[in-house]
Amino acid sequence: MILFIVIAMNLMARTTSLLSRNNVFYSRVSFSKSGQRQVFRFYSNSDDQNDEDNEGVIESGSSEERSSYHPNSHSLQNNRLKYRLRNGLPLTGVVSGQYRDTDHVEMLGLLGYDFLWADAEHSSAGPDDIATMILAAERRGLPTLVRIGYGYQNIIGHVQKYLVSGAQGILLPQCESRDDVERIINAVKFPPLGQRGLAGERWNAWGLANASDGSCDPASPNHLPLSKCVESANQNSIVGVLIENQIGLDALDEIMAVPELDMIFLAPTDLSANMGLHGQIRHPKVLEKIEEAGKKIQQFNEEQGDERGMIAVGTLVLNAEDYAYWRERNFHVLCGVAQCMFVDGAKDLLDKIQDYEERNMK
């Protein structure tokens, strides 16, 4: 376990540097569509908004966008992730189903990654397991999106278990239709946008700020009445889908037409399998499919204009070269895999150790 932590920290730190991230706690560095550097700082709710050591309101460069934030509040109560998704700003996430080790989740937050992709599809993790990952992520200001298993868009109660655990959003694999998207929206959003059930839960501080008449106790660490929490949740919760086969690619037009959809992730591994090229994620035919779909989503965004907000387009990256390749093609959400980070770091270290020993045996 110690070796895992050391290797993972080393590789994550180097990857963070390659991606030009800022690893200062409660600070994020990104780049606008024009290449302008933008710094996201977190301030307190005090009157002195010039104190950069405080926390609470996010400032994104010259943008007038602001979001109320409190150190004890949930990521749903600030709009940083949603804002960046809808405005085409680059985001780097990490996919992990390693739910028995939450230390690496905290490390990812401290290193400056934008979100955790907690994987309940390609792992044995259930809602209770994912909840421990979310707690670790929230501790370090890292929002969590949960990828559920295929078919669970039909079971709202199952999806809501991850939301109760504190997920900021849900990612649906194998999306093939508008109906799939609308089912997930029904599970994630409260009325009138969806059918999510309302109760005192982690994301709203279990309603501790509220009296029975709906008023807010100003001494509460949450500082928001339940009605405002619901409003923020509907605004800031995230719905993303994965396109992983030809059926999904053919249905892109109807999928994109759903207003509440925030992200489309073009998943190369399952797409390669669907094409009979199992695991060949950099095969020219696989790359061509992903690039064509990416262009189609980007064209849709241009036609819709700024009023709707962009649908972020994303895909998998396993190294810095992958990252550069897809950023040059205007992909915004690029995700690495924690397991690959560990394997690559461990292999790189072992290769260097063996190379050293072989050189010194001569």
Image (tube, rainbow, N blue to C red):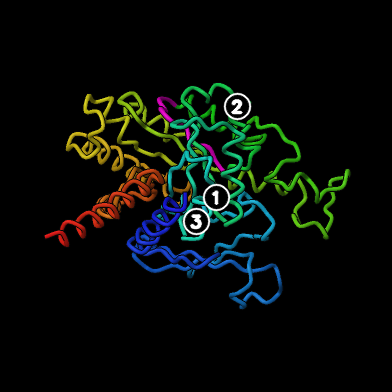
Which residue type carries mark 2? His
Q: Residue 97's x, y, as percent?
A: 47, 38
Which residue type carries mark 1? Pro
Nearer to us of marks 2 and 3 is 3
Residue shown at the point (21%, 40%) measured from the top left: 282
Answer left or right for 149 relative to 287.
right
Looking at the image, is mark 1 or mark 2 earlier in the sequence? 1
Q: At numbered mark 3, what does the secondary structure look like: helix, strand or loop?
A: helix
Residue lying farthest to the front in this orientation: 361
Which residue type carries mark 3? Met
Answer left or right for 212 relative to 357.
right
Residue 310 belongs to magenta span: no
Verify CB contact (< 8 Å) between mark 1 and mark 2: no
Local packing at callout 1 (Cα closer than 10 Å; few below 14, some 14-19, many 20+) is: many
Residue shown at the point (75%, 53%) measured from the top left: 224
Q: Residue 344's x, y, as percent?
A: 31, 49
90 and 132: which is toward the camera = 132
Residue shown at the point (76%, 57%) measured from the top left: 221
Residue 107 bears which disc, if any? 3
Q: Residue 314's x, y, as percent?
A: 37, 44
Quadrant including the C terminus: bottom left
Decide: is 173 above or below 52. above
Decide: is 254 above or below 297. above
- Extent of the magenta region: 168-177
Q: At numbered mark 2, what does the secondary structure look like: helix, strand or loop?
A: helix
Nearer to us of marks 3 and 1 is 3
Residue 216 bears which disc, if any? none
Residue 143 bears which disc, if any? 1
138 and 268: which is toward the camera = 138
Residue behind mark 2 = 158
Q: At numbered mark 1, what does the secondary structure look like: helix, strand or loop?
A: loop
Looking at the image, is mark 2 or mark 3 earlier in the sequence? 3
